[in-house]
Image (cartoon, rainbow, N blue to C red):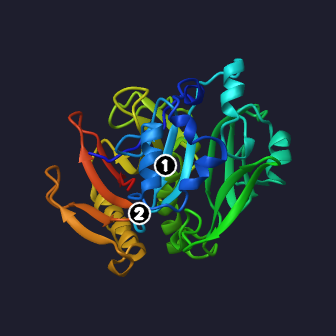
Amino acid sequence: MRFKIVCSVFLSAIFFSLTVSAMEYSGNSLLGILGKDRSSREFQEFRQSWNLNAKDENNIRGIKVFVNPGTSKVESILFAGDNYTLNNDRFTKYSSQLPFGVSLTDNPFALSTKLGAPVKLAEKNELHFSHQDVAVEVAYNGENSSRIYSVKYYNESGIAVTPKVTDGGIKSQPIQMASIGKPIHAAEAVPAANDKIAIFKKAIMDVFKAYRESAFFKIKGQSRAEKNFWNYKYTYSSNLKIPGEKFSMLYSYPFASSDLDYVSVIKEADNFDKSFETTYHEFEKRLQECFPAKDGWIASCIPNKESKTLSDLELRNDRYGAIVLDYCRNPKGKHILYMRFLLFSN
């Protein structure tokens, strides 16, 4: 039903299970694949070294490489996960293998001594650093910023950094290359406050952005106690809000360790009435206005076995995935209108 990526990993396992070959790509040498083509020799060696799967990730070691589907070039490297421990000498030793000497035990002050002054992002407990033409985003778990939850590295400009190790320590050599920019696109720019269409479009694009940057882990909130239409057991709140929705949630199905996915519930009720059709057509119009064919979106209507009047509207873009406006009725007679997402990694 969905193309999903998992970053449900344990960060400690990243470092405890390193093999000799993986050690060839550690520390600053990890940055050497930023901007490289997915078919390049360097990337293939990196994939073999870290034993990446077809999705360019290794869940045991907690690493995910994001490749721009339009250019086939590596955009970013993410280390993400939870439930890891910080009480082992081996952990401290291996965590220093992250680029720029970042350790998973570093607090914000320690990071600033290595990376310079940070910029606090809108998300809680998340910092952005610019160091040697590379952006470093660090997310913490907990209010006291004592546990690093994820670390992400990506090109900040069109300058790739190829680190060199000399007698004087680690230095970097800038090499000019075609700009691939930050993994953020014009469609995700902050819109004017009074532009409702732009705000709606940005909210939708933020879903794709959250998936590409951390497989939804950075927006995962507390467990939800409320029941849901699908009776999913493992559901979580999200700080993403789409204008006009009733609520949105993240969920893992069928197990707590399964991939995270995202759904935006627009309307639900015990009985079907005309308001479902009205709301459907309102969202249909918004989606078609925000995601036209000229921007690479292909719209299609998929027959809906549960309704003769409401087809499933799909808007697909090979760069991001698809948005599906869907109406469903479950065996208990509950009715729901929602948006689901098909999410592409490559």
Q: 56 or 267, which lies in front?
A: 56
Q: Which residue is mark 1?
A: 65
Q: Which image quadrant is residue 260 in?
A: top left
- Distance CA(mark 1)–CA(mark 2): 12 Å
- Please identify the quadrant where the N terminus is shown: top left
The C terminus, quarter of image: bottom left
Residue drawn 58% across the image and 44% down it = 218
Q: Based on the displayed image, in which of its 4 quarters is residue 290 positioned?
A: bottom left
At x 33% / y 60%, what residue is drawn? 322
Q: Position of residue 281 (x, y in %)?
A: 32, 67
Q: Earlier in the sequence, mark 1 or mark 2?
A: 1
Q: Determine whether, in the image, residue 132 is placed left or right of residue 339.
A: right
Which of the pair 184/56 is nearer the observer?
56
Which numbered marker is on residue 72? Answer: 2
From what the image shows, is residue 48 above or below residue 308? above
Query: Are the two marked residues, 1 and 2, in contact with CB atoms closer than 8 angstroms?
Result: no
Instruction: Describe residue 330's horizontal placement relative to residue 211 as left or right.
Output: left
Task: Please give left or right for residue 273 compared with residue 267 in the image.
Answer: left
Q: Mark 1: few, some, or many residues within 10 Å (few <14, many ≥20)?
A: many
